[in-house]
Amino acid sequence: MSLETISEQVCFGGRQGFYRHASAETKTPMRFAVFTPPQAAKGPVPVVWFLAGLTCTEENFTVKAGAQRAAAELGLMLVAPDTSPRGEGVPGDPDNAYDFGLGAGFYLDATQSPWAANYRMYSYITLELPGVIAAHFPADMQRQGISGHSMGGHGALTIALKNPQQYSSVTAFAPIVAPSQVPWGQKALGRYLGEDRAAWRAYDSVALIEDGRGVPKMLIDQGDADKFLKDQLQPERLATACKAKGIECQLRMQPGYDHSYYFIASFIDDHLRWHAAALLA
Amino acid sequence: MSLETISEQVCFGGRQGFYRHASAETKTPMRFAVFTPPQAAKGPVPVVWFLAGLTCTEENFTVKAGAQRAAAELGLMLVAPDTSPRGEGVPGDPDNAYDFGLGAGFYLDATQSPWAANYRMYSYITLELPGVIAAHFPADMQRQGISGHSMGGHGALTIALKNPQQYSSVTAFAPIVAPSQVPWGQKALGRYLGEDRAAWRAYDSVALIEDGRGVPKMLIDQGDADKFLKDQLQPERLATACKAKGIECQLRMQPGYDHSYYFIASFIDDHLRWHAAALLA
């Protein structure tokens, strides 16, 4: 499994790198970013995954969230994948919309043509990329947590709910919690998975919880000035589903905050400390 | 003096805004960014200016440095101006190079045609924009500090050395300390100010110190893996000049760090605390 280093830069005493590899899942080159904290010099460190939202790449979180400071303090590796396959031959949205296709893989394995060939972000994130990280970085893969923003919050929650043995902690910023019930999700799941809504439940956090999947607890931050709150995000659906199943859902409505990385930067330290509490215990 | 708000977003309990106004100095619209910390709700707060480097705008520091967290903690307003006039009729580099003209105002008042009409960043930063800030923001203009990166470090140092009564504290990241003696500076000063090198000394930190200007102390961070270190930056010239004049120059060579915002982000907290120590004393 060969890995190409695009760049590596010292940051907070650790190393911020950008890398590229040939993905068997997506059948494309895939890029990702890794922050290796200074503690890794002494041995493998826990990993926190951060899945980004619509239109993003591996760069947004890495450049804008200011997460490296706390990660360096706590001794956490940060892995930021891209949000979809890209490149020659990868089909995008037929209308070039921002909310489907390129930059909008929704962290699922598509079953419908023409998406099924490349759009395998679920397997990429949960299986293939962890293998790359384990092979090339000083990561302790027995200690992984996962977080994400918006579409990536959906990714983090669904992935943690389906793989609680793999991820010991989960948090999200302004996640899409019930894609089956909101426009972004209905468009994406309908195309990637087809119109049989039963198949959608495997990629819908609220449905997964209703169907018996669970994690002990989760931390969710949501800005109350987020323009997507009412139509696309609806975190109260998650809180209700968690309550019915006895899952501890810390849903914090943050006054005045919007959907941007200024919001994420403001609370990323809390999230990393939440992960550290689970991963370093 | 009218001010247009481009955007305002809540960040660390404060407000990150982008603004535009018509500058009398540059005869163009100018953009700038202001972070207003939460403490400003109770009364005027000290101001720290951050001057960016070649190719940058008001966005780079604001998006990439992660400075708002510490500014919110310390109660400091952050002002990030653009690095040159821009727009219709503003002449740029004849060869479209990155190191002169647009994005490369060098924080001076040009005297040579065709630059003299618009390139008045020294007066803009020291006189006009402070007036805008004083008029529109809860800033205590009796408590100002200044910092910057690369070309902006040159700006911060020269401006502080020439106006010690206006700026109570000064720091810099990887500054151009002796533009008269390095290629970036020789190109810019030669064109903006003409070939009489006597005129250059007013915009050269080392020359200003040799000529008797001073501040009590300064903090400089410099990465030792910075690719511009030997040819363009040469901070030892500043240390030598300071030593000869009894100025306390804390020059910290940071092992492994390069010229990027990952370097700035790693040490911005130290710089803001340095400013806070002077401004909140």
Image: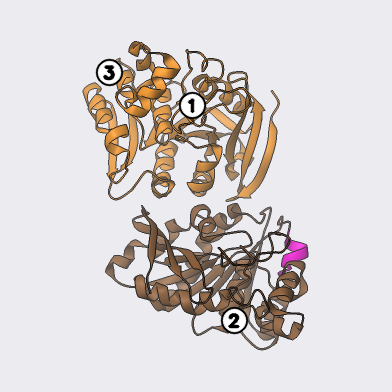
Chain colours: A brown, B orange
Q: Is residue B249 above or below residue A110?
A: above
Residue A111, position as x, y percentages in the image: 65, 81
Chain for mark 1? B
| Residue at x-position 33% and y-position 40% | B221
Q: Residue furthest bottom?
A: A212
Q: How far apart are the two marked residues, 3 and 2, measured between alpha carbons?
A: 66 Å
The kind of residue tagged 2 is Leu
- Mark 1 and mark 3, same subunit? yes
Q: Which mark is residue B93?
A: 1
Question: For residue A174, which numbered disc appears in the image?
Answer: none
Magenta: predominant secondary structure element? helix
Chain identity of mark 3: B
Residue A116: percent from the left, percent from the top? 63, 77
Q: Is residue A132 visible?
A: yes
Q: Position of residue B145 (x, y in %)?
A: 46, 31
The circle on residue B210 is 3
In the image, farthest residue toward the front: A89
User: Badge 2: few (under 14), some or many (20 or more) residues near its Cα, within 10 Å?
Assistant: many
SS class of the residue under badge 2?
A: helix
